[in-house]
Image: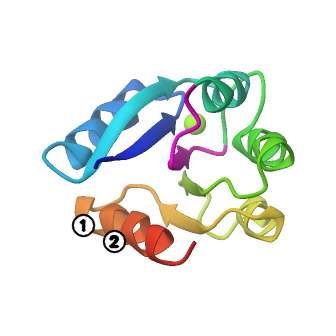
């Protein structure tokens, strides 16, 4: 059965890149959001197996959305995808419970490897 994925990013280009990466894989993109508020709402609505989350977004950042989602569901699997490579925000997300960090721009195989790795280590 396909692993259900929620992708949240304020960039339409990134949504397209994620959608094309997941096409014809064991992952199914069940919902896409464009800010942290939508991330929390869509998480509650869909309860995905995996969340791909940008950090810098309007309304509510990915970092805050991550914390809210983990407060609702401590077993949530969230991978941060951001261009903030060495930023403190990345460290803070990992300390808060994000499972992986993937640097933008990403190679498809790199993202899929991170996703598979997270599912193997629940
Ligand atoms: Mg962004």
At a point 28% along the width and 37% down the height, the residue shown is: 19
Give the residue at x 70% y 58%: 75
Apparent side of residue 91 relative to residue 22 in the rendered image (left or right): right
Q: Is mark 2 within 8 Å of ligand 1?
A: no
Which label sits on residue 16? Answer: none
Q: Residue at x 73, y 23 (%)?
A: 37
Q: Position of residue 68 (x, y in %)?
A: 83, 40
Residue at 48% x, 37% y is 7
Q: Which residue is mark 2?
A: 113
- Residue under label 1, please give it: 109
Q: Which region of the structure is painted magenta?
A: 46-55
Tell which residue pokes out farthest to the front in this image: 1
Residue 117 falls within the magenta-colored stretch: no
Q: Residue 2: image x %, image y %?
A: 29, 47
Foreground pick, 12 / 21: 21
Quadrant field for ligand 1: top right
Classify 89 as above or below 73: below
Report the side of 8 relative to 43 (left or right). Answer: left
Kindly check if marks 1 and 2 are in contact, taking CB atoms under 8 A apart as contact: yes
């Amino acid at each position: 059965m396909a692993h259900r994925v929620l992708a949240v990013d304020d960039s339409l280009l990134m949504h397209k890149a994620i959608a094309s990466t997941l096409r014809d894989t064991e992952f199914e993109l069940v919902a896409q959001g464009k800010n942290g508020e939508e991330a929390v709402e869509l998480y509650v609505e869909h309860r995905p197996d995996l969340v791909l989350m940008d950090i810098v977004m309007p309304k509510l950042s990915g970092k805050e959305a991550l914390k809210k989602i983990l407060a609702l569901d401590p077993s949530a699997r969230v991978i941060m995808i951001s261009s903030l490579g060495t930023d403190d925000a990345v460290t803070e997300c990992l300390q808060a419970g994000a499972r992986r960090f993937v640097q933008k721009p990403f190679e498809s195989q790199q993202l899929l490897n991170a996703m598979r790795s997270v599912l193997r280590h629940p």
